[in-house]
Image (cartoon, rainbow, N blue to C red):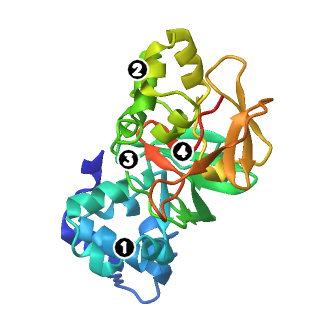
Amino acid sequence: MKKMFKSSALLFAMALTGAVVFSSCDKDDDPTPAADPTITDVVVSDPNFSILEAAVVRAGLADDLAQPGTFTVFAPDNAAFTAAGITEAVIATLTPEALADILTYHVLTTKVPSSGVPASDAVTTLQGESIFASKNANGVFVNGVNVKTADVPASNGVIHVINGVLIPPTQTIAEIASAPGFSILLSAVVKAGLADAVSGPGKFTVFAPTNAAFEAAGLTQAAIDAASVETVTGIVQQHVIATNVYASDLINGATAPTIKTGATLTINTSPAGVKLTGSANDYSNVVTTTPGATFNITATNGVVHVIDKVIL
């Protein structure tokens, strides 16, 4: 798919600058009506997209977004790039290949207006990995990033302005759980026979207790090893939701079914947390492992939230 974005620098320059020379052999001819702006035209004409324009130029992407099509572009504005620490100077240091990988992760080949965004779903991008879209009372989101201005029209699709930069994920949920600090969770997932499920395609949400959280609940590695498969499976399943739920999708008091039959989670938002519906136990709070990081850890097949207590 990325090949469709490769063409000559000359063509791209023409598309970006609008350097089209109109000529006429008769000054009395009817004027040519102005064409509806393409996605490229919209980006170039808006000074709030100057960093995005610079990234597109550096990436060597062609004029395809000026051609007929049904594209959807989730477009970070200058404020979004700056908040991510990406300036034009930074862009100049990145390889064209790296920028193309990021930019095509913001593009769908089908036109999706904001009214068509589902409550939650995974959609394959031009880059090849999925983005996770959602819509709720808080607004419209992709990978938990807010759409700040929706449905900017173009002749060949639609633009949604977003307040963050989407970075393509490189790991599955299982691979994220392989990080230091989650070894007990990973062994429980393996014992439950769910390693393949959280490694394959999907749009799962996993609330991931740290080793410290397991140990505080008396679930040491030795305890997991000694427990029955059925017991461990039940514990793991009640930490997994079969659809994407980002922090932006958490609605206070709402419930969501887990993959364990009959087990649902009740949501808390002040602070963010979850607990088994009907349980007398405290909420398991969603935490971050890195200062300043967001709660959401996007995987190729869903999202992970680190929690400070095992959901029991």
What separation in Å lies between label 3 and label 1 (alpha carbons)? 18 Å
**Of residues 157 and 169, which is closer to you in this image?**
169
Residue 17 location in percent, x, y?
A: 34, 79
**Of residues 21 and 78, which is closer to you in this image?**
78
Whichever of labels 3 and 2 marks the residue nearer the N terminus, that label is: 3
Q: What element carries label 2?
A: helix
What separation in Å lies between label 1 and label 2 (alpha carbons)? 39 Å
Residue denoted by label 1: 86
In which image quadrant can residue 13 be found? bottom left
Q: What element carries label 3?
A: loop
Residue 56 location in percent, x, y?
A: 32, 68
Instruction: Check disc 4 and give the amino acid type.
Output: His
What separation in Å lies between label 4 and label 2 (alpha carbons)? 19 Å
Instruction: Check disc 2 and give the amino acid type.
Output: Val
Whichever of labels 3 and 4 marks the residue nearer the N terminus, that label is: 3
**Of residues 178 and 294, which is closer to you in this image?**
178
Give the left or right position of residue 151, taking residue 3 as reference: right
Residue denoted by label 2: 190
Asked whether the residues under the numbered discs 4 and 2 touch, taking CB atoms below 8 Å apart as contact, a structural biologist would say: no
